Image (cartoon, rainbow, N blue to C red):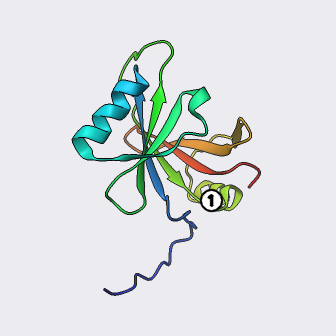
Amino acid sequence: MTEKKDDSPIKYSFPKSALVTLHVNDMKRAIKFYEDVFHFKVSYTEARQLGWVEMTTHLDGLFIGLNESVHGLAENQTAFTINVSNLEETKAYLDSKGVDTTSIEEFAGMIAMFFLVDTEGNRIAIAGPSGS
C-alpha cells in the first residue's frame, strides 16, 4: 500500500475525520437498526443526555452521529461534518477562499464548530475540540 501525500491546507482530525449526522425520532430503534442491518457499533455515548450517539462504520475515518429529535422530523436534516484539528486555521483558510462561514460556536463545552453551505445548498459543519 502506498502512503498518501497530504498536501491539503486543512489539517483533518484523525482517526475520525468525517461524520454524517442522521436525525432520528427514536434513538433505541435507530441504534438497533444500524447495529442489526449494517453492523455499526456504538462508539460514543458521553453526550447521550443531549440526544447524541456516535457509531463506527466499516470505512476508515467515517462515523455516523445519531441526533434524537425532540420535536419530530420536519424534513430530511442530514448533515455532513468534517472534523479538523484547528478550527481557527481552517475557518481562516475557508474565508480566504471566499466561503461564507458562520462564527465558531461552542456546544456544552464538548465540541466547537462553525457552518457553511456548499454551492448546491448543502449544509456542512466544521468541528473541532472545544477551545481549539
- The residue positioned 51% from the left and 72% from the top of the image is 8
In this view, the residue farthest toward the right is 131
Q: Secondary structure at mark 1?
A: helix
- Residue 54 location (% of width, % of height): 47, 43
- Residue 24 location (% of width, % of height): 40, 25
Is residue 64 or residue 42 the one in the foreground?
A: 42
Q: What residue is pinned by disc 1?
A: 90
Q: Amino acid at mark 1?
A: Thr
When asked about the image quadrant of residue 50, the answer is top right
- The residue positioned 31% from the left and 86% from the top of the image is 1
- The residue positioned 71% from the left and 35% from the top of the image is 108
When asked about the image quadrant of residue 64, the answer is top left
In this view, the residue farthest toward the left is 37
- Residue 106 location (% of width, % of height): 72, 39
Q: Is residue 101 left or right of residue 75?
A: right
- The crowd level at tag 1 (other Cα within 10 Å; few <14, some 14-19, many 20+) is some
Q: Is residue 62 above or below residue 53?
A: below
- Residue 122 location (% of width, % of height): 41, 39
Is residue 103 or residue 85 the one in the foreground?
A: 85
